[in-house]
Image (cartoon, rainbow, N blue to C red):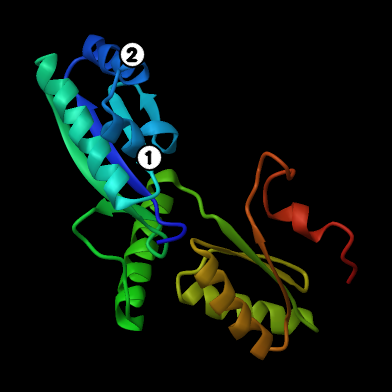
Amino acid sequence: MPGDEWRVEVKLADEAHGQSVTDRLRSLSLDDEAREKLGRDVIVTRDDLDLFLYSESADEAKEAERVIRELLSEDRLQADVKLTRWHPVEESWNDASQPLPSTEAERASELERKEARETVEAVEEGDTDWDVRATLGSHSDTTALADRLEAEGLPVVRRWRHLFVKTITEEDAEALAVRLRKEGAEVEIEARDFEVGTGGPFRFFAGIGG
């Protein structure tokens, strides 16, 4: 399948063994069949005790899994090996036995899991990823809307006729933007990027009059 992504995950039990497996993968003399399956199309990376072998097909991934298991066995190394597949809707590596979603209900289920995971991550990190900025016609309208949003538990910053609301996902930001536009607000959505911006909500209000 075009654009398909597969990954063999190897979690080694010992740091010294990790380098041994990586070195052998680089220089291993494979027979013609294994060379054709792995070759240049399988990318090997390492992160401390974890090895990852990436490919674009199930056949290549399974062959990479076979090769890595043989290497581990030959070197008598202990490791957990798992074959996974990238799920773009959920944005996660899932067990290869789990098929990609093929119906709207399955896609909606994966999207819910993605949003739930992002919510947990945002809470743990104490931050959110998306900013919604709204400008209303009057100070009183802005205050009333801010009060309603805060009553719903949304983090709101109000400055004169401007509201700044943080959301966890892009989907949440878009849904909130639709709602605020129905309230008569001018709305903009922006991904948070503190390395580029000046940080904090006030960076969005520069140059806005009234």
- Relative side of 146 to 103, left or right: right
* Image-quadrant location for residue 158: bottom right
The tag on residue 23 is 2
Name above or below for residue 122 compared with residue 112. above
For the image, the number of numbered tags is: 2
- Asked whether 179 or 90 is in front, the reply is 90
Residue at left offset 27%, top offset 53%: 94
Residue at left offset 39%, top offset 51%: 5
x then y, percent, for residue 200: 67, 49
* Image-quadrant location for residue 69: top left
* Residue ID for mark 1: 54
Mark 1 crowdedness (10 Å alpha carbons): few <14, some 14-19, many ≥20 = many
The secondary structure type at the circle numbered 2 is helix
The amino acid sitting under disc 1 is: Tyr
Mark 2 crowdedness (10 Å alpha carbons): few <14, some 14-19, many ≥20 = few
The secondary structure type at the circle numbered 1 is strand
Name above or below for residue 161 compared with residue 166. below
x then y, percent, for residue 150: 52, 72
